[in-house]
């Protein structure tokens, strides 16, 4: 846990969140500003700043994130997009690894 990390506080229950699902390694909750009918964030319980650090530090936890993202996407039904914004120039604003699961509408390509 990192003291000043918003998503660590969400994992700890110190900041409220709209829970969707969880497993041993990861927690899924609804994004505060949804960009699609289904917009769920999947975060590892372990604090790592991004998916690259997570997979190097704990590949099992990274798999746990992917498994939970798949479960959330399956429950949403149909096509979906899984996004790991990584680094400021790629629009990462919270530096605790997270996957966005986006579904429920047609999604354009390439992304902006
Ligand atoms: P990113 O820009 O990839 O770092 O995504 C961070 C996401 O976290 C954004 O989509 C925000 O809307 C979302 N977010 C920030 N604070 C909260 C919160 N307290 N609860 C749920 N989602 C949040």
Image (cartoon, rainbow, N blue to C red):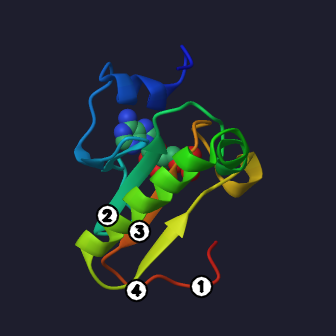
The first of marks 4 and 2 along the sequence is 2
Residue denoted by label 3: 102
Crowding at dot 2, Cα within 10 Å, few <14 / some 14-19 / many 20+, comes out as many
Residue 23: x, y in percent? 33, 46
- Kindly state the secondary structure of the residue where label 2 is placed: helix
Q: From the viewer's perspective, is the residue at label 4 or at label 3 nearer?
A: 3
Residue 65: x, y in percent? 48, 52
Residue denoted by label 2: 72
Residue denoted by label 4: 106
- Kindly state the secondary structure of the residue where label 4 is placed: loop
Q: From the viewer's perspective, is the residue at label 2 or at label 3 nearer?
A: 2
Q: From the viewer's perspective, is the residue at label 4 or at label 2 nearer?
A: 2
Image quadrant of residue 85? bottom right
Q: Return the mark for residue 109.
A: 1
Q: CA distance from mark 4 to mark 1?
A: 10 Å
Residue 21: x, y in percent? 26, 50
């Amino acid at each position: 846990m990192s003291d000043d990390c918003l998503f660590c506080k969400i994992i700890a229950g110190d900041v409220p969140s709209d829970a969707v699902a969880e497993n041993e390694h990861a927690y899924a909750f609804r994004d505060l500003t949804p960009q699609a009918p289904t917009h769920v964030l999947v975060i590892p319980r372990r604090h790592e700043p991004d998916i690259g650090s997570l997979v190097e530090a704990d590949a099992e936890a990274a798999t746990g994130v992917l498994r939970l993202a798949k479960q959330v996407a399956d429950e949403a039904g149909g096509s979906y997009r899984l996004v790991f914004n990584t680094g400021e120039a790629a629009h990462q604003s919270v530096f605790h690894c997270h996957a966005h699961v986006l579904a429920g509408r047609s999604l354009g390509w390439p992304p902006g």
